[in-house]
Image (cartoon, grey):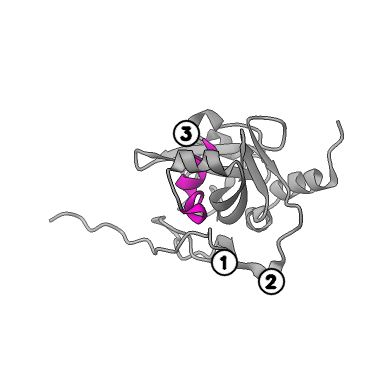
Amino acid sequence: MGRSAGGTALIDLLAGPVLPAARGLLGCLLSAGDVTVRLTEVEAYAGTAGDPASHAHRGRTPRNAVMFGPPGYAYVYFTYGMHWCMNVVTGPEGEASAVLLRAGAVVSGIELARSRRRSTVDRDLARGPARLCSALGIDRTVYGTYLLGDGPVRLSPPASPVPPSTVESGPRVGVNGAHDRPWRFWIAGDPTVSPYRRHTPRRPTP
């Protein structure tokens, strides 16, 4: 089966540098089962290339192996002992860059998303990386899934591109290193974008 022009463009986007890939993912659709989310906020991580906030900064491990490519695969990790978060692997194979999917708007399957999230506020269903995974039913089983095919989780291009004038950028959230690097991108004015909270390192107990 031939690829659509939009699908080919998405493959090419993910194979390139992480910052353009992150911007280009805004507005894309992420589907898992019967729920689809339109991405409204993402965050870029540059792997071993001088980015201390990346999970791959210290090199390949069993946990981060999928980050080393090829692009278009899902890197899913567990955090705070309770939440799943999902990244899309980008860049040339071996570079370990990835884009964290931070927030989105549920555009189909909203009743199922509500039941998973037990939320009555629709803007909050996928507002934040852990909530996004919860709304979509994403967990460890998605790790290593190819997102541009017909698998259980599918990434597809937007119906229409997000105008560059509506994209804003700023510091990353909740990271210890390079948190002021403006590698978080979001659609300005979208109510599903998560609120920014500057990372505050914990002080050691006396």
Q: Which residues are magenta?
A: 121-137
Q: Secondary structure at mark 3?
A: loop
Q: Is residue 166 positioned above or below 87 on the image? A: below
Tell whether 144 sits left or right of 195: right
Residue lying farthest to the right in this orientation: 2
- Give me the disc on residue 169: 1
- In this view, the residue in front, 139 or 67, is 139
Which residue is located at x 72 percent, y 66 percent?
Answer: 163
What residue is pinned by disc 2?
A: 165
Q: Is residue 184 visible?
A: yes
How far apart marks 1 and 2 lie (CA) works out to 11 Å
Q: Is residue 45 visible?
A: no
Q: Is residue 15 positioned above or below 161 on the image? A: above
Residue 156 position, x and y percent, is: 71, 44
**Contact between labelled residues 2 and 1, with CB atoms less than 8 Å apart:** no
| Residue type, label 2 | Ser
Residue 35 position, x and y percent, is: 60, 39
How far apart marks 3 and 2 lie (CA) works out to 37 Å
What residue is pinned by disc 3?
A: 63
Q: Secondary structure at mark 1?
A: strand
Quarter of image, res 190: bottom right
Of tags 1 and 2, the one toward the viewer is: 2
Quarter of image, res 183: bottom right
| Quarter placement of the C terminus | bottom left
Residue lying farthest to the left in this orientation: 206
Tell whether 160 sits left or right of 109: right
Q: Is residue 169 positioned above or below 127 on the image? A: below
Which residue is located at x 63 percent, y 53 percent?
Answer: 18
